[in-house]
Image (spheres, rainbow, N blue to C red):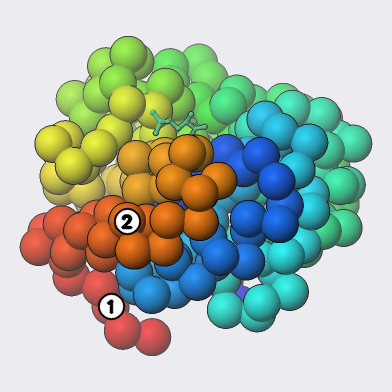
Amino acid sequence: MDVLAELARHRLVPVVVIDDAADAFALGDALVAGGLPVAEVTFRTAAAPGAIRALADRGDVLVGAGTVLTPGQVDAAVAAGARYVVSPGTSRAVVERCAEHGVLALPGAVTATEVQAALELGVTTVKFFPAGTSGGAPAIAALAAPFRDVRFVPTGGIGPTNLHDYLALECVAAVGGSWMVPRDLVAAHAHDALRTLVADAVAAADALRPLARA
Ligand code: 3PG
């Protein structure tokens, strides 16, 4: 499977902070029910590897790891079943370890210098983080002018009110964010609330960029 193409097909990447890996299966249910079987589980909690494994084992959620800062975390993420690895910035060590595992790396870059550094590592799709405080959609559009083959996955400060600004840009592969999967609702197994948030995000994305059926 072309993981990047699949993320782009879904257009949205729910960014998950999970406190207990035992909550992951119920989260998966809500994601699938909401029509967005995708999750980026961040290494901001110790539960991340277990949660990635629980989601990967379901077989119906495209699961990746987020907030990956070290090669050791890449190893842990891939061992748990992560199909892609997202980092807030660009680390040569992390990108190279991803390449060794043959797993998609989405390192962060928000300046022309950072995008060039990512390109030198063979990366052509970068996370644009933190999007809201780094110039937002206009900054991505400006970067896309010289970097015509680079695609961006903006995250950070994105929600229902500004999602369209980002999805309107052709160079945006997908938009990430935690607004679809609030940490407290995940911990509470609030299936209906999570499913509604996810479905609302999918509907908003559909309005601008219809889902290409596989
Ligand atoms: C990330 O790790 O991608 C961001 O922290 C998500 O940002 P958000 O919580 O503002 O959506």
Q: So how many labels did they put on this image? A: 2
- In the picture, the disc for residue 56 is none
Of 153 and 188, the residue lying toward us: 188
- In the picture, the disc for residue 193 is 2
Of 166 and 143, the residue lying toward us: 166
- Left or right of residue 36, residue 80 in this image: right
Classify mark 1: helix, strand or loop.
loop
Classify mark 2: helix, strand or loop.
helix
Q: CA distance from mark 2 to mark 1?
A: 26 Å
Q: Going 87% across and 58% down the picture, which residue do you hit?
A: 79
Q: Which quadrant contains ligand 1?
A: top left
Q: Position of residue 44 (x, y in %)?
A: 67, 30
Query: Disc 1 marks which amino acid?
Result: Ala
Residue 96 seen anywhere in this rendered image of the structure: no
Query: Disc 2 marks which amino acid?
Result: Ala
Q: Going 50% across and 56% down the picture, which residue do you hit?
A: 189
Q: Residues within 10 Å of mark 1 (few under 14, many from 20)?
A: few
- CB of mark 2 near ligand 1 (< 8 Å): no
Dot 1 corresponds to which residue? 212
Question: Residue 129 is drawn in which quadrant?
Answer: top left
